[in-house]
Amino acid sequence: MRVTTETLGAWLIKCNPAVTDVDSLLTSGDAIRSWCVAANYRTALMDAGQPAVLWVSGRTGGRFPRGVWGIGFVRAAATPEVAPSSAGSAARSGRIVARLHIPLLSAPITAAKIAGVPALRDIEVLRQPFMSNPSWLSKHHMSALQALL
Protein backbone atom coordinates (compact mmCIF):
# COMPACT_ATOMS: atom_id res chain seq x y z
CA MET A 1 0.00 0.00 0.00
CA ARG A 2 1.30 3.44 -0.89
CA VAL A 3 1.25 6.01 1.91
CA THR A 4 -0.58 9.29 1.33
CA THR A 5 -1.25 12.20 3.64
CA GLU A 6 -4.81 10.87 3.93
CA THR A 7 -3.75 7.37 5.08
CA LEU A 8 -0.76 8.40 7.22
CA GLY A 9 -1.11 7.77 10.95
CA ALA A 10 2.58 8.30 11.76
CA TRP A 11 6.04 8.09 10.28
CA LEU A 12 8.01 5.21 11.72
CA ILE A 13 11.71 6.02 12.02
CA LYS A 14 13.87 2.91 12.32
CA CYS A 15 17.03 2.80 14.39
CA ASN A 16 19.38 -0.02 13.42
CA PRO A 17 21.72 -1.03 16.28
CA ALA A 18 24.30 -2.21 13.73
CA VAL A 19 24.62 1.41 12.56
CA THR A 20 23.64 3.51 15.60
CA ASP A 21 24.92 3.43 19.17
CA VAL A 22 21.54 2.44 20.66
CA ASP A 23 22.93 2.26 24.19
CA SER A 24 23.98 5.93 24.17
CA LEU A 25 20.87 7.03 22.30
CA LEU A 26 18.37 5.39 24.63
CA THR A 27 20.16 5.87 27.94
CA SER A 28 20.68 9.61 27.31
CA GLY A 29 16.96 10.26 27.75
CA ASP A 30 17.16 13.02 25.14
CA ALA A 31 14.40 13.42 22.58
CA ILE A 32 15.34 12.44 19.03
CA ARG A 33 15.81 15.72 17.09
CA SER A 34 16.86 14.52 13.64
CA TRP A 35 17.34 11.33 11.64
CA CYS A 36 18.64 10.44 8.20
CA VAL A 37 15.96 9.26 5.79
CA ALA A 38 15.93 8.02 2.20
CA ALA A 39 15.36 10.43 -0.66
CA ASN A 40 12.02 9.07 -1.87
CA TYR A 41 8.35 9.96 -2.27
CA ARG A 42 7.67 9.21 1.41
CA THR A 43 10.29 11.65 2.62
CA ALA A 44 8.79 14.29 0.33
CA LEU A 45 5.46 13.83 2.19
CA MET A 46 6.99 14.49 5.62
CA ASP A 47 5.72 17.75 7.09
CA ALA A 48 5.62 19.66 10.37
CA GLY A 49 3.13 18.37 12.91
CA GLN A 50 2.80 14.83 11.56
CA PRO A 51 3.15 12.09 14.20
CA ALA A 52 6.44 10.17 14.32
CA VAL A 53 7.48 6.97 16.10
CA LEU A 54 10.98 5.66 16.91
CA TRP A 55 11.41 1.92 16.26
CA VAL A 56 14.55 0.08 17.38
CA SER A 57 15.16 -2.75 14.94
CA GLY A 58 17.53 -5.62 14.47
CA ARG A 59 19.46 -7.50 17.10
CA THR A 60 20.05 -5.44 20.20
CA GLY A 61 21.51 -8.11 22.45
CA GLY A 62 18.41 -8.21 24.63
CA ARG A 63 19.05 -4.98 26.51
CA PHE A 64 16.99 -2.93 24.09
CA PRO A 65 14.22 -5.10 22.65
CA ARG A 66 12.92 -4.48 19.18
CA GLY A 67 9.90 -2.19 19.14
CA VAL A 68 8.63 1.34 19.72
CA TRP A 69 10.89 3.43 21.96
CA GLY A 70 9.51 6.92 21.35
CA ILE A 71 6.50 8.81 20.07
CA GLY A 72 6.49 12.43 18.93
CA PHE A 73 6.17 14.44 15.76
CA VAL A 74 7.91 15.88 12.70
CA ARG A 75 9.21 19.42 13.34
CA ALA A 76 9.81 20.37 9.70
CA ALA A 77 10.01 18.88 6.23
CA ALA A 78 13.06 16.71 5.56
CA THR A 79 15.91 18.59 3.89
CA PRO A 80 19.37 17.90 2.52
CA GLU A 81 21.97 17.95 5.28
CA VAL A 82 24.33 20.88 5.20
CA ALA A 83 27.79 20.21 6.61
CA PRO A 84 30.75 22.56 7.00
CA SER A 85 33.39 22.12 4.33
CA SER A 86 37.15 22.34 4.80
CA ALA A 87 37.11 25.85 3.30
CA GLY A 88 34.81 27.05 6.08
CA SER A 89 31.72 27.30 3.90
CA ALA A 90 28.71 24.98 4.01
CA ALA A 91 28.16 22.15 1.54
CA ARG A 92 25.46 19.57 1.08
CA SER A 93 26.46 16.14 2.33
CA GLY A 94 24.07 14.19 0.09
CA ARG A 95 22.11 12.92 3.10
CA ILE A 96 18.46 13.82 3.73
CA VAL A 97 17.58 14.68 7.33
CA ALA A 98 14.15 14.61 8.94
CA ARG A 99 13.67 17.21 11.69
CA LEU A 100 11.89 15.50 14.58
CA HIS A 101 10.86 15.76 18.19
CA ILE A 102 10.48 12.21 19.53
CA PRO A 103 10.66 11.92 23.31
CA LEU A 104 11.59 8.47 24.55
CA LEU A 105 9.08 6.28 26.37
CA SER A 106 9.81 5.16 29.93
CA ALA A 107 9.54 1.58 28.65
CA PRO A 108 9.27 0.34 25.06
CA ILE A 109 6.28 -1.23 23.41
CA THR A 110 8.02 -4.40 22.25
CA ALA A 111 7.63 -5.95 18.83
CA ALA A 112 6.34 -9.10 20.55
CA LYS A 113 3.56 -7.12 22.26
CA ILE A 114 2.72 -5.29 19.03
CA ALA A 115 2.60 -8.54 17.05
CA GLY A 116 0.14 -9.88 19.62
CA VAL A 117 -2.40 -7.20 18.74
CA PRO A 118 -4.49 -8.31 15.72
CA ALA A 119 -4.85 -4.72 14.44
CA LEU A 120 -1.04 -4.30 14.39
CA ARG A 121 0.17 -7.65 13.03
CA ASP A 122 0.39 -6.31 9.49
CA ILE A 123 2.38 -3.12 10.11
CA GLU A 124 5.05 -2.55 7.49
CA VAL A 125 8.02 -2.77 9.87
CA LEU A 126 6.97 -6.31 10.86
CA ARG A 127 6.17 -7.40 7.29
CA GLN A 128 9.16 -5.76 5.61
CA PRO A 129 11.76 -4.92 8.26
CA PHE A 130 14.53 -4.07 5.79
CA MET A 131 12.79 -1.18 4.02
CA SER A 132 14.47 2.21 4.19
CA ASN A 133 13.49 5.10 6.46
CA PRO A 134 10.87 6.31 6.80
CA SER A 135 8.45 3.48 7.26
CA TRP A 136 4.91 4.34 8.29
CA LEU A 137 1.80 3.42 10.24
CA SER A 138 -1.71 3.91 8.90
CA LYS A 139 -4.27 5.89 10.92
CA HIS A 140 -5.79 2.57 11.99
CA HIS A 141 -2.39 1.26 13.11
CA MET A 142 -1.53 4.43 15.01
CA SER A 143 -4.85 4.31 16.85
CA ALA A 144 -4.20 0.69 17.86
CA LEU A 145 -0.63 1.56 18.97
CA GLN A 146 -1.84 4.48 21.09
CA ALA A 147 -4.23 2.10 22.87
CA LEU A 148 -1.11 0.23 24.10
CA LEU A 149 0.29 3.31 25.84
Image (cartoon, grey):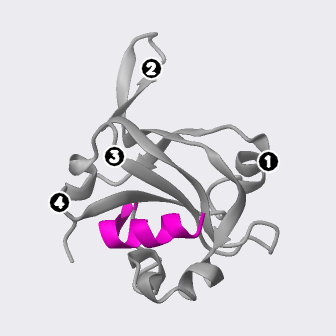
Q: Could you tell me if the residues under marks 2 and 4 are in contact, i.e. CB atoms within 8 Å?
A: no
Sequence-first disc among 3 and 4 = 4
Sequence-first disc among 2 and 4 = 4
Residue at which label 1 appears: 27
- Residue placed most toward the observer, 25 or 83: 25
Mark 2 vs mark 4: in front? 4
Label 3 element class: loop
Mark 4 vs mark 1: in front? 4
Residue at which label 4 appears: 6
Residue at which label 2 appears: 85
Label 1 Cα neighbours within 10 Å, binned few <14 / some 14-19 / many ≥20: few
Q: Which residues are magenta?
A: 133-149
Q: Residue visible at 82% across and 68% down?
A: 63
CA separation in Å, label 1 and label 2 = 32 Å
Q: Position of residue 37 (x, y in %)?
A: 39, 51
Q: Residue visible at 68% across and 64% down?
A: 108
Label 2 element class: loop
Q: Position of residue 95 (x, y in %)?
A: 38, 42
Residue at which label 3 appears: 50
Q: Position of residue 67 (x, y in %)?
A: 61, 70
Label 4 element class: loop
Label 3 Cα neighbours within 10 Å, binned few <14 / some 14-19 / many ≥20: some
Left or right of 25 on screen, residue 75: left
- Residue placed most toward the observer, 20 or 94: 20
Label 1 element class: helix
